[in-house]
Each structure stands twice: as C-alpha cells, then as structure tokens.
C-alpha cells in the first residue's frame, strides 16, 4: 500500500506520522515543523536574546545532539552564537564513548567544543570514585544525586570558561513530565516550586538556563535525529537502573499508552501548579566556600564534596530533606530517614 | 495491637473518631444547624462517613456534631451498563440501610441529568459567613437556643426538615423518593456513554455529571454543604491522576478539604485523613453497612484508563516505599487556591463550563504546553466546508498564527458549535472532549449554557468600546 502524500507539502510521500497528532508528513516537512516549533518556543518565551553566547550542554546523547543541531540551524535567525560544553563525569565505558560522539559531531558542525572533567574541577572525584565511596553501605548508592548536582556545577564552570551568557540543555517534554511525577511522589516541594517553568532566569550570579526542547516529545526528538542522520550515543548510563526516575519513567510509558497527550498534559499541569508561599524555596544567598548560588551556608556541590572528602558520603544527603523510607538491612538504621537513589538526569 | 483484650479496639475507635472530628473542627466550616448533604456511594469510605455522622449526632456529649444531615445516593447503573432489574435490587438494598440510618435521603438516577436546568453550571455567590468571628457567634447563638426552654425545636429546624435530635422519627416529606428512571433518559445516557471513545474520558464525564446532579439536589433542598467520603489514599491517587489529566492548576480544589468553586454549595472531605486500610478495618470491626455497586471501570483491565493506571501504580509503589501515599498527601496540603498570575485583584475570569474552575488557559499561552496542543488541534480539525474557506486564512496551522483565531467568536468560530463549547472549557476538560466525537448526546443543559455564554461573550465584545466596566457586575471578560 503506497504511503499517503505529505499533509504539508502534498508533493512528497509521507515518511512518518507525528506521534501526537497522527499527521502524515515527509521527512523534510517534519524537520521543518520541528525546527519551527523550537523557534517558536524560544521566541515566544523570550529565552535567548539577540547577541547571546549560548553554551549547549552536549552529552553526546540524542537530546543534546538534536538541540545543538536545531539551534545551529536557527542561530542566524535568532542572532546567537553557540559553544558546545561537554562534561566528563569519569564514568568508565560510558562517558568516553559518548564524548567521542560529541567530538565527531562537533567537527561536523564546526562548532567549538570545550570538555570539563569532574576529576579536574572537583579534586579528583570522578563518578566511579563516588560510586565506590558510597557503595557497601547496604543501601542504594544515590550516585545520581551526586552526579546531578556536580554536573550542573561543571556546566556552569564550562560555560563561564567560554564566556557564555546563557546555558541550554536538551530536556524534552518527557523529562519534564517524569520530573513532575517524581517530585510529587517524593514530596519534593522545593523542586516543585522551582521547576515546571521554562528554566531559571539566573539568580545570584548564576547564568540563566533554559530548555528549548521542553515542549517536544521524546519520540519526535528521536524521529528528528533519524531524519537528519545525526550521530549520537544511545546507551544508558551504567548507574541509571538504580535511579528513582525509573519508576516515573515506567509510569509515563503506561500513561502515554492510555492517552497519547499525557506527556503534554503533565507539562501543562507543571506550568500551572500553585504552591503555598511557605513552600517556596529559600532566598538565594552565596556559598561560603565557592561563592556560588546557595540557599544555605554551603552550596549543595560543596556540601556533597565535603561529605565525600570526609569519608562520609551521605552527609549532605537526607539532611533537611524529606525522603521516603528505604528497605535497608533489618534492624539497622531504623527510623532514620534516607532518600532513595534519585534522578538520572540533572534536577531542575 | 499485639495485646489481647478489647482495649486496643477502643483505642482504635477513639483515634478514628477523633480524626473525623478533628478535621471538621480544625476547619470550622460547618456551622451549627447547617444542612449538610452526605454523598453516599455505598462504598466503604462514604459508608464510614455516614456512620461517623450518625454516631456523632446521637451522642449526648457537649461536643456533639450539630448540623442537619441528609444523604444522597446517585444510581449510576445506566452509565455502567447495568440492567434495570439489577439497579432496582441495589436501590432496594440502599433503602434498607438508609432507613436504618434515619436521615433524610434522596435517591436520584444519573439519567436525571437530562432534566437539569442550565443554572446548575453557574456559580452563585456564597453567603458572607466564613469568618472566624462569625463561626464563634453562630456557635454561641446555637448554644443559647439550646438552653432557652421556650424555643425548643423551632429555632433550629426549617419547614419540612427532620428534627436532628430525634433521628429515629420517620423522614418527612422533604426527601426524594426513588422514582423509576424514565426510559428515554436512560437510553440517552447509554447513548452518551457509548459514544465516548476512551474509559478515561468516560470516567471523567461520569464524575462531572454526578457532581452536577448532587449540586442540583443540594441547591433544591437547601443544603449548603456536601460531604464526600474521599479517603487519604483516594485523594493521593486523585492528585496524581489530576496531574496526568492536565488539571495541575486545580489540585487544591480537587483534593483539598473544602472546594468552594460552586459558590453557594461547598464540598468538604472529612475522611481525608483516613487511609483506606483504616476505613476497611473500622468498617469490619464495627460492622458498618455498605453495598457493593459496580463502577464504570469494574473488571476493566489495569491499563485501560489513566485512573486505573495511576491507582495501580501508587498502590504498587506504596508496597515498596510505604510512605508514598502520605508523602503525596502532605504535598497536596502545600497547594493553594491561587488565581492565575497577574490576574489577582482583577475581575474574576471565566469559568470552565463543565468543571467550573477558573479557566487555566488564555491567549498568552503560546509558549506553553497549551499552545502546542492547540497547534495540533487546529491541524486536526476537519476540513472547513468550501463556503467558509476563503474567509478564514487565519485558520491555517501557521506556527504562532494558529493561536487564538480558531477559538474566537469571529466569522469562522460562529459556524462551528463544537468550537463554541470547547473554547469554554479548561485544558483538562478540552483534552477529555477530544474523546467525545459528537457533542449532540450531551445533556441539553450543557449545550444550552454553552450557547448562552458564547452569545453573551460575543455581545460583550461587540459592545466593548461603549461599556463602562463596573467591578460589582458579574461580567465575564469575554476572553478565552
């Protein structure tokens, strides 16, 4: 049975159906529509002003590869210049392969690439070292908690190195939906109060961050990468199976099957949450050690590293945070509040 | 609960009852002598609630509950595909229990929505009685009336109302006898529910119609409060479900203790501190009667609707992380009933036609999820008839240009009655309507009210430049 004609240009044969609307489009028209929608998100949300130097968090994965590609296409229209910043967390067998993909792609795009490594920034602490340090306690390792916080710090450092004015990351609509579900399931009111919008405007000297793909569904990101023949690294991080986000991800897959628009509906809910003023995050101060944005005396990165250096990696985890009880070894640490391993992607 | 003997049973009962009273006492929303309608589904939570009210009223202590209760049961059998015979059997069982309880009761069939007036969808201003001072004054005057010997029952009861101090007296004529459902209405209801494509949308529609019907019963018989039996577990699930349905803006109303969206009738949830487990345990220990009625999703597979999925997920996660339900519940307490940013202090915005919450979308939403949805919706609309095409270039799916035009009351909008209704709905209700292919089977009160509102909006727009806005008027701003 021959494919129907493209619903947009009516000339070429349709090569795909858009996951949400079911509309049949040819590859070119779909990519054009995708790019137009990202452009619209950036312009309508006033995310990137003219003249901005934009640091793209490039991990080598599909989201950041698509993001960089689309922004490169749109750069002349938006009047921005791009810098790629890749973070090397020091996860053997995973990150090196991903970085190779970033390097290849950066060469093709002819965009400048800067790599920042945890080992350099954080006194030799790679993620593998953190995992070893937190292992053996009988509870889950919470690797993702460390990685998320440190990666944001690393991205910030990398962005400053290249003189960027804005940071963009490739979070898509599915990520936003998962985060919303997770935050409610774990009662993370602080994150609920901060996230859900289009990004952060950058308080206390931190660079403004945004997520231009946050209204694009994951399937469409994959389709775009396919049609543009983009080279990306698609394996899961070795520590990801331990993350709580896995539960939210499974739930999202099921919801999507029951109602295709569930992802966008969740994003809409996130945008419209109304939290009590007491639940709002504490006003921004500065970390006493590194001067970065912090709501307590030490910023989270410094607090985490402090714990690692002292041989007590869980020092900054669970303190002042309401977590869920975990099934630890019976009899031990009963009554102590522990957080389960958290997200596999940086928290917003 | 390891020791033998009856002591723990009394402890549990005391704790259970205390929670019920505490929730009511803490919020101080129910005034003495007020008429409160208990929404009873026959299920364990609402049955327990009815029982708590019964016990609370009959006790002779100084802390007795003081309001005037009534019970409403909605027979939803037609929407669930039950036969008339089965429905009659269930209703008979319900009546037996209701007679034991002895409150006023109202048994209504869901198909009676086809006789509802459009006014049920309007929000009427509440009596200004909500301040703390007013509550205390009301309690004081109530106590005075209690002790004044000459006044006796007259000061409390309203004409036709049963005396709350004598619950075993036969119900008076003010309650609703169960009428056999009208066949044409039953058929219309079946037709409506059969036309809805997904179980999720059916469930939502059922809840909406049920709410309207109960609201109508409350208004007709002078009840100013409605109590529903939602437990802590149910509310946690409901919160997560509402998120997935796009109702993030209304969580505080959907899951909070009190829901004042209707204005004159306030919905309260006194069972919200009780978990399903506690309720089941209590009902079993103290033989609280309940009746099983099949629901619209009974025996449906787990993946068939958002509601079922979320319920299964939350309960499964609860097994692994035992504080899931209480965590979600506690988070729900941090939510507030806030107006849209920037509209605080201005005239009240338009309300959703079906769920009656303030609309959570407007034309400034082009960069949000709503904007993306309408983009797709406009691409999905059936091709306009050739007669309209030349006049409607704005209806094309141009990015940024598609926003707002297909929803306006301009020349293209006026020809499409479905667009009229859709544009008066909130985001969540719009998504539900996508699964309802034709609006014709909907009960007439909805379509009539939609027509009325869009007429009014269009007239307002025409007269915009000549009208002087007066903040006291109940004017709709005409934008949506």
Image (cartoon, rainbow, N blue to C red):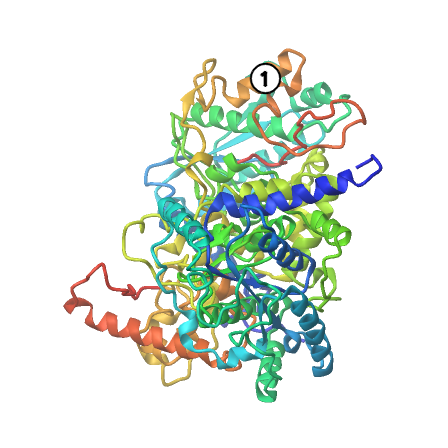
Most distant residue in the bottom direction: B184
Task: Classify the position of the C terminus of chain B by image quarter.
Answer: bottom left
Task: Classify the position of the N terminus of chain B by image quarter.
Answer: top right
State the residue at coordinates (52%, 71%): B213
**Is the residue A266 above or below the residue B209 in the image?**
above
Most distant residue in the right direction: B4
- Image mark count: 1
Residue B190 x %, y %: 62, 81
Q: Residues within 10 Å of mark 1 (few under 14, many from 20)?
A: many
State the residue in front, A299 or B187.
B187
Most distant residue in the top direction: A310
State the residue at coordinates (54%, 49%): A173
Residue B407 in which image quadrant: bottom left
Left or right for B19, reference B418: right
The residue that disc 1 covers is A305
Camera sees residue B287: yes
């Amino acid at each position: 049975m021959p494919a129907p004609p493209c619903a947009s240009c009516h000339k070429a044969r349709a090569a795909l159906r858009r996951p949400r609307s079911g509309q049949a489009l040819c590859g070119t028209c779909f990519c054009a529509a995708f790019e137009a929608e990202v452009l619209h998100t950036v312009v309508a949300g006033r995310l990137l002003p003219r003249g901005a130097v934009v640091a793209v968090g490039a991990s080598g994965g599909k989201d950041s590869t698509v993001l960089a590609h689309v922004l490169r296409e749109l750069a002349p229209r938006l009047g921005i210049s791009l810098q790629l910043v890749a973070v090397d967390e020091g996860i053997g067998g995973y990150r090196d392969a991903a970085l190779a993909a970033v390097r290849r792609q950066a060469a093709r795009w002819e965009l400048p690439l800067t790599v920042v490594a945890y080992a350099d920034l954080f006194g030799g602490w790679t993620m593998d070292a953190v995992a070893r340090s937190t292992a053996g306690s009988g509870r889950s390792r919470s690797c993702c908690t460390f990685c998320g916080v440190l990666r944001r710090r690393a991205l910030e450092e990398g962005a400053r190195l290249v003189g960027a004015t804005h940071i963009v990351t490739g979070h898509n609509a599915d990520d936003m939906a998962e985060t919303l579900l997770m935050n409610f399931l774990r009662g993370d009111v602080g994150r609920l109060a901060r996230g859900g919008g289009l990004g952060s405007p950058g308080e206390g000297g931190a660079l403004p961050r945004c997520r231009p793909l946050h209204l694009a569904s994951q399937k469409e990101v994959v389709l775009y990468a396919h049609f543009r023949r983009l080279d990306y690294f698609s394996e899961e991080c070795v520590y990801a199976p331990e993350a709580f986000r896995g539960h939210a991800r499974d739930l999202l897959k099921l919801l999507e099957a029951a109602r295709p628009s569930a992802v966008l509906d969740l994003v809409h809910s996130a945008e419209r949450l109304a939290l009590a003023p007491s639940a709002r995050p504490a006003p921004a101060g500065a970390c006493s050690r590194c001067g970065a944005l912090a709501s307590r005396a030490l910023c989270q990165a410094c607090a985490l590293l402090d714990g690692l250096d002292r041989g007590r990696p869980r020092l900054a985890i669970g303190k002042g945070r309401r977590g869920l009880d975990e099934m630890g070894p019976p009899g031990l640490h009963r009554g102590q509040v522990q957080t389960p391993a958290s997200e596999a992607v940086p928290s917003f | 609960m390891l020791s033998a003997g009856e002591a723990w049973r009394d402890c549990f009962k005391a704790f259970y009852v205390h929670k019920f009273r505490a929730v009511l006492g803490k919020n101080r929303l129910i005034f003495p002598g007020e008429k409160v309608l208990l929404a009873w589904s026959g299920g364990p939570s609402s049955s327990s609630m009815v029982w708590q009210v019964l016990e609370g009223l009959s006790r002779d202590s100084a802390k007795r509950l003081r309001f005037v209760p009534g019970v409403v049961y909605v027979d939803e059998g037609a929407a669930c595909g039950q036969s008339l015979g089965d429905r009659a059997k269930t209703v008979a069982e319900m009546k037996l229990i209701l007679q034991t309880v002895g409150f006023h009761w109202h048994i209504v069939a869901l198909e009676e929505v086809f006789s509802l007036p459009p006014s049920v969808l309007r929000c009427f201003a509440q009596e200004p009685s909500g301040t703390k001072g007013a509550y205390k004054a009301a309690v004081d005057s109530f106590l005075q009336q209690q002790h004044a010997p000459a006044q006796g029952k007259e000061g409390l009861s309203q004409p036709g109302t049963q005396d709350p101090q004598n619950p075993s007296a036969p119900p008076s004529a003010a309650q609703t006898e169960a009428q056999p459902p009208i066949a044409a209405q039953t058929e219309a209801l079946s037709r409506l529910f059969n036309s809805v494509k997904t179980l999720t949308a059916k469930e939502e529609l059922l809840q909406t119609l049920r709410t309207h019907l109960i609201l109508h019963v409350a208004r007709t018989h002078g009840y100013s409060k409605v109590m529903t039996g939602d437990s802590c577990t149910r509310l946690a699930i409901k919160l997560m479900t509402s998120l997935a349905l796009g109702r993030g803006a209304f969580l505080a109303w959907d899951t909070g203790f009190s829901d004042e969206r209707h204005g004159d009738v306030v919905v309260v949830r006194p069972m919200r501190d009780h978990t399903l487990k506690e309720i089941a345990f209590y009902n079993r220990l103290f033989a609280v009667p309940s009746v099983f009625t099949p629901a619209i999703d009974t025996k449906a597979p787990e993946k068939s609707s958002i509601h079922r999925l979320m319920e299964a997920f939350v309960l499964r996660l609860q097994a692994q992380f035992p504080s899931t339900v209480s965590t979600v519940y506690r988070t729900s307490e941090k939510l507030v009933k806030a107006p849209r940013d920037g509209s605080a202090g201005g005239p009240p915005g338009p309300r959703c036609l079906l769920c009656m919450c303030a609309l959570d979308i407007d034309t400034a939403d082009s960069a949000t999820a709503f904007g993306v949805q309408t983009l797709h919706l406009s691409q999905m609309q059936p091709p306009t008839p050739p007669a309209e095409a030349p006049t409607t270039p704005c209806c094309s799916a141009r990015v940024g240009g598609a926003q707002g035009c297909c929803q306006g009351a301009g020349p293209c909008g006026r020809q499409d009655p479905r667009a009229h209704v859709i544009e008066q709905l909130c985001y969540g209700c719009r998504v539900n309507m996508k699964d309802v292919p034709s609006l014709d089977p909907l009960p007439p009160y909805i379509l009539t009210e939609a027509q009325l509102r869009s007429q009014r909006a269009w007239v307002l727009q025409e007269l915009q430049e000549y009208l002087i806005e007066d903040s006291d008027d109940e004017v709709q701003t005409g934008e949506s």
